[in-house]
């Protein structure tokens, strides 16, 4: 799936391209980032993703409806893809190369925010 590219013309008539939200530095929704974190370790089905999110951060576990809407949105945007279903009740998902790039960009963005919070005195400085 190709990503959307918008062409903008600046005040001096230079053309610049701007990728859509999923390829830009715009933040991911927390549920999307948690799903990508889970799938970065390998293929998972919905319930296994929820279990992994809970093991990582119990306060971040989305309700089932929120997670499945996020999964559908992420499949549509090409961040993840479905794998052949094991049976009628279980669909496995895996991260795409594009999804991995977006997840890494989000991790770097969050790391920079944490660094700024340390410098601003909101978090303890690392030893």
Image (spheres, helix red, strand yellow):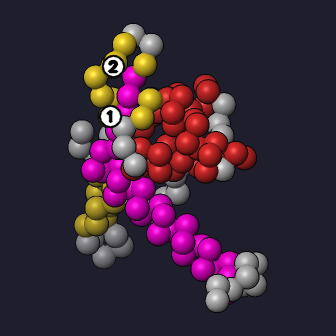
**Relative to 64, does residue 111 appear above or below in the rendering?**
below
Determine if the magenta segment contains residue 100.
Answer: yes
The Cα atoms of the two marked residues, 1 and 2, are separated by 12 Å
Magenta region's main secondary structure? helix
Residue 108 vertical position relative to residue 46 in the rendered view, above or below: below
Residue at x-position 72% and y-position 46%: 59
Quarter of the view holding residue 8? bottom left
Q: Is residue 98 visible?
A: yes
Q: Position of residue 53 (x, y in %)?
A: 59, 44
Residue named by callout 2: 85
Residue 1, compared with residue 111, is above or below; it is above
**Residue at 62% across, 74% down:** 114
Q: Which residues are magenta?
A: 91-119
Q: Position of residue 79 (x, y in %)?
A: 36, 43
Q: Residue at x 51, y 37 (%)?
A: 49
Please say whether residue 18 is one of the residues in the magenta stretch.
no
What residue do we see at 73% from left, 78% from top? 123
Quick check: can you spot residue 75?
A: no
- Could you say whether the residue bearing mark 1 is in a helix, strand or loop? strand
Q: Residues within 10 Å of mark 1 (few under 14, many from 20)?
A: some
Q: Furthest-top residue in view?
A: 88
Between 1 and 104, which is closer to the camera in this rendering?
Answer: 104
In this view, the residue farthest toward the right is 122
Give the labeled residue for mark 1: 81
Q: Are marks 1 and 2 in contact (CB under 8 Å)?
A: no
Number of marks drawn: 2
> Quarter-wise, where is residue 76 in the image?
top left
Percent coordinates x, y for residue 12 in the rendering? 30, 76
Nearer to the camera, 13 or 5: 5
Instruction: Please indicate whether residue 81 sits to the left or right of residue 112 in the image.
Output: left
- Asked which secondary structure carries label 2, the reply is strand
Badge nearest the viewer, 1 or 2:
2
């Amino acid at each position: 799936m190709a990503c959307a590219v918008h062409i903008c013309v600046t005040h001096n008539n230079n053309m610049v391209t701007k990728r859509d939200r999923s390829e830009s530095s715009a933040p991911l929704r927390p549920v999307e980032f948690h799903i990508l974190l889970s799938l970065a370790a390998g293929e998972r089905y919905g319930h296994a993703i929820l279990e992994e999110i809970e093991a990582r951060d119990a306060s971040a576990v989305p309700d089932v409806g929120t997670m499945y809407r996020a999964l559908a949105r992420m499949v549509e945007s090409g961040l993840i893809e479905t794998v052949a279903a094991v049976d009628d009740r279980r669909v496995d998902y895996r991260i795409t190369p594009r999804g991995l790039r977006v997840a890494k960009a989000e991790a770097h963005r969050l790391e920079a925010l944490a660094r700024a919070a340390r410098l601003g005195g909101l978090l303890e400085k690392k030893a």
